[in-house]
Each structure stands twice: as C-alpha cells, then as structure tokens.
Amino acid sequence: MKLEIGILNLGIEWQLLLDQIGVPYSIFDNERSFQDINEFPVLIINDFKKTYTNEINKYLSSGGVVITNAKLAKSFLHFSKNNIYVKYLSTDEKLFQDNLFCDIYKNLTCVKNANLFANEVAKNLFYINNISEGIIVVIPDEFIEIISDNRTMRKKFPSEFGQRYVTEKVAKISKGKIRIIIHRLLEYLYQLKKLPFVTKWNFPEKEKNIFCFRVDSDYSSIQQINDLHKTCESNQIKASWFIEIKSIENQLQVFNQFKNQELGYHCFRHKIYSSYQNNLDEINHGLELLRKIGLNPKGYAAPYGEWNEILNTALEHFNFLYSSEFCYDYDNLPSFPILGNNFSKVLQIPIHPISVGRLSKTKHAEDEMLKYFSDIISEKFYFDEPIIFYTHPFQNRFHIFSELFQEVSNLGIKNYSLLEYAHWWKERLNVKWHVDYRNNKILIDTSNHDEKFSCKVRLPNGDVFIETITNGEINCKNKLAQKIIYDKKINFSDLRKFDVNLLKEEIIFRLRRLKQ
C-alpha cells in the first residue's frame, strides 16, 4: 500500500495546503490512473465525473477513506446541505487533541447532518462517519478555497498577562489554522487505518525548530539601530533587517558595518500604494539608494505588514525572493500566495505579528513580555511552526531580547535568517518522493541525497520520529523526545466580540496613514 494521498482533480488551494503540510500525494486525472485507487489509504475528491461514482462507492465499501465537499457529497451520496455563516470555528475536540480557534468570516455550505467542528453558535460544519467498511469526511464547500481570501481586520490576540489581549491588524482568515485542521484530520484518518503518517519536516537538517528575528528599522534613530545590532551581535543572532530609508537617508552606511546579518528592504517612505506604478516607483527609488552603498536586498517586508496583489506584482518585477506581511498571513508555514489561478513568484514567510510595542500598549510589564514570547515558543513547538518574532529598534527594550535570545539558545534552537529559510523552503518544495508501506516497512523512493531534508513519521502508536529523506527503508531511530503541552484556555466569544477600542485603533491608524 502507498502512504500517499490520492487526489481527484487537484485545485490550487489544495496544492498549497498539501505542499505546506508536506504529505506525499498523487493526482488522478484520467481513467487509467483512477484504476489504481485502492493503493491509496485516503482519497481527496475535489471534483469528479459521475462515471466514477461506482468506483468511489467500491473504494469506500472496501475500507477506503474519502474526503470531499458538501456539493459532491450531495451529488454521489445524496446528502442534504445548507448554508451557514461562520464567524469563527472553535473546537476542543478530543478527536484531534487540540484547542483550536480559526477565523472564517464567510458563508459556508455544509451537509445538514454535520457532526464535527462547531462555529460560534454551536452549529457543526464537518461530517465524519463510516460507510460500509470505509470512512467518509465531508468538509464545507468553501473551507479550502478561503485560504486565497486576502481581507484584513484588526484582531485581539490572547495573552495570559497584561490586559489579557493584545491587538494588531492582520489577515482576516486564519490560514494557518485551516492548514492545522486539515493536517490533524489527515493524521487522525491514517491513525484509524493503523498506518504511519509521513510528511516532509518543516525545518532543515532534523532541527527540532528554528528561530528567525526580523527587524523593521522605520522611524528608529541610528543609536537605537546600533544598540539593537549590538544586542544581536553579543548573542550571536543573525537578524533579518528591513531598511526604511527616508528617516536616515544620509546615514545608510551604518548598515554596511553589520556583519552576519541579513539586510532586506522595507520602504523609502513608510507607505504602500493601490497603484502598481506608485509601488514600482517607490521600491525602485529605495533600491537605487541601497545599491549605491553596495546593498542588494532579496527580502522585503511592507510597511504596517500590509499586502495586496498589486504590491506583489511590483515585488515580482524586482525579483524579490520572499516577502513577509502579516496582513497576508501570520503564524503559519511559508507559501506562495495564490493570484487567480496561479501562484506568486514571491514566497511569503509569515511571522508572529505581536511586537513589544503592542504588548506595551496593553499594559504588559517587561517580565510579562518575556513570558508572552515564551508561551508563543511553546505553541510553535506544538504546531511545528518556525519561531519568528519581530521588533522595531525605536521600541527599545533590548534587554528583553537579550533574555529571549538566551532562552532560544538554552532550548537548543538554531538561528536562521529569513533569507536562509526562504532558500531552504523553496528547495523543500522541490523534493520529489513516493512513500510505500510493505510488510510493515516504510519505503521511500526519491532522488534526494541532501541531508538538509527530513520527514516526520508519526506511527499508529503515537511515537514520532524525524528521519532523513533518502532512498530505501526508513529506520525509525531519531525519536522526537519532547512532549509539548498545549492547553491554551481561550474565551472565544470575548476574543471576537465587538470592541470599541479596536474601532478607535483602526480610525487612528487610518488617520496616521493619511498624514504620510
């Protein structure tokens, strides 16, 4: 049997998610390949011809697992469906052992007898049940597609400290949580089938995690920039600096003194535009000034974390390798944004969007700021996401970062620049492999010979191993030892109820932008 997922008619959103998760998959696109369906333990049906109905029913009756949407479930299983507005999805399902919260803000089409994953008014959205010897899973029609939704909103993020919430303007849809839900679902289904679940690992060279530190230099003095650089240097931290030019235009040479740091581009003037030409002119002007002092940035981070497709097109024009905007995505794995029916050429690297400045505004004491970041580190370990924090030099509090860097070092977490991680992630996407399961042995077929790329193997008994992706049998020896407890108690209804303070912040933000 294969340990790959079969997928009938791969859509661009499914491709993005499966590539992030790193699960091996094969695409069925014609009747000949469809005959091999029984080799696959799980089949995702994104679309299908009615002539396949009998084959799908045979697959289910012989013990196969089918994941499909409400529309197709109505077509070949005659399930009824209805429309439900979903503000957010929340669950503490024991099924997945997670306390998940996922912003949706969309009408979803679900089957009427849904029995899993409730929205804010306790209406279930997913359906899972046995059909004969098999298992059927029905997800809402639009659930996968909303990862291409690029709306933004100002949100409250939970904290155990200060005023219990901290705010930032970010992507409206919780793209990272959608990925986690699909990942956990697949993992659970493989466990039901008593099969190993094998995915590409999210970090280089069997690292248990990685740490990246992003610095946006806007409105900071040369002294503050130097002080933060000294903090990084003394803690042997390779930070990724995104340079705002206008406020220090005559002192840009300060960045040429930096060693072992990545230097990226933030902006000339702290603003992005709705016009392609304006974005093009602004970026070109700033890059020309940086090139005059010998800098050629490959990474970009937009002012205020904003993102739009027009900006992305301008970034493609200048051949940026990656960008990082939390109004596109946050707390997630890297991906290439979806633009119509194609992927952007510029990789997006999400970060955790809360800075010390934001924590200060919600009355977090300095020791509580450190505890806040420690909690996020635990969360990142639990979800196998990179630990990526950011700051501005003008926010000072360099001693907090010195302590944070020391904590990261004590945990044995290796530091990477965002540029290094972007290069590695693009290579990860290109690793081709097939995974079989024969005589209780996991067998890999791959052309990869680079030890930078590993896979995560979750056995049916719950044990997890990280092993190099290489040709032949996987010998599970490198057990992932740490057991991270993630039990964040969140008052979901309070987190997303109307808050006049959020409205005030948004008004102030817009007025501030108009003045620039």
Image (cartoon, rainbow, N blue to C red):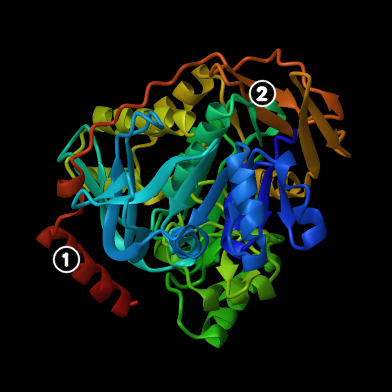
Q: Residue at x 39, y 47 (%)?
A: 127
Q: Which of pointers 2 and 1 lies earlier in the amino acid sequence?
A: 2
Q: Nearer the viewer, residue 377 or 366?
A: 377
Task: Look at the image and tell me in which quarter the N terminus lies.
Answer: top right
Q: Quadrant of residue 458?
A: top right
Q: Is residue 286 above or below residue 425?
A: below
Residue at 49%, 45% in the rendered image: 136
Asked if residue 56 is positioned above or below residue 4 in the image, the reply reads below
Which residue is tagged 2?
A: 466
Q: Residues within 10 Å of mark 1 (few under 14, many from 20)?
A: few
- What amino acid is labelled 1 in the image? Leu
- Determine the CA span between mark 2 and mark 1: 46 Å
Residue 24 position by quadrant: top right
Q: Vertically, is 191 above or below 164?
A: above
Camera-nearest label, 2 or 1: 2
- Residue 357 image position (x, y, % from top left): 29, 47
Q: Nearer the viewer, residue 306 or 473?
A: 473
* Label pair 2/1, CB-CB below 8 angstroms: no
Relative to 500, 205 lies left or right: right
Front residue (pair 100, 154): 100
- Element at badge 1? helix
Q: Residue 437: where, in percent of width, then height?
A: 75, 27
Residue 486, by quadrant, is top left
Q: Position of residue 256 (x, y in %)?
A: 65, 52
Query: Given the image, on which type of amino acid does mark 2 rest?
Result: Ile
What number is the disc on residue 503?
1
In this image, 348 relative to 231: left or right? right
Q: Residue at x 33, y 54 (%)?
A: 103
Residue at the far left: name it.
500
- Location of the C terminus by quadrant is bottom left
Above or below residue 123? Residue 516 is: below
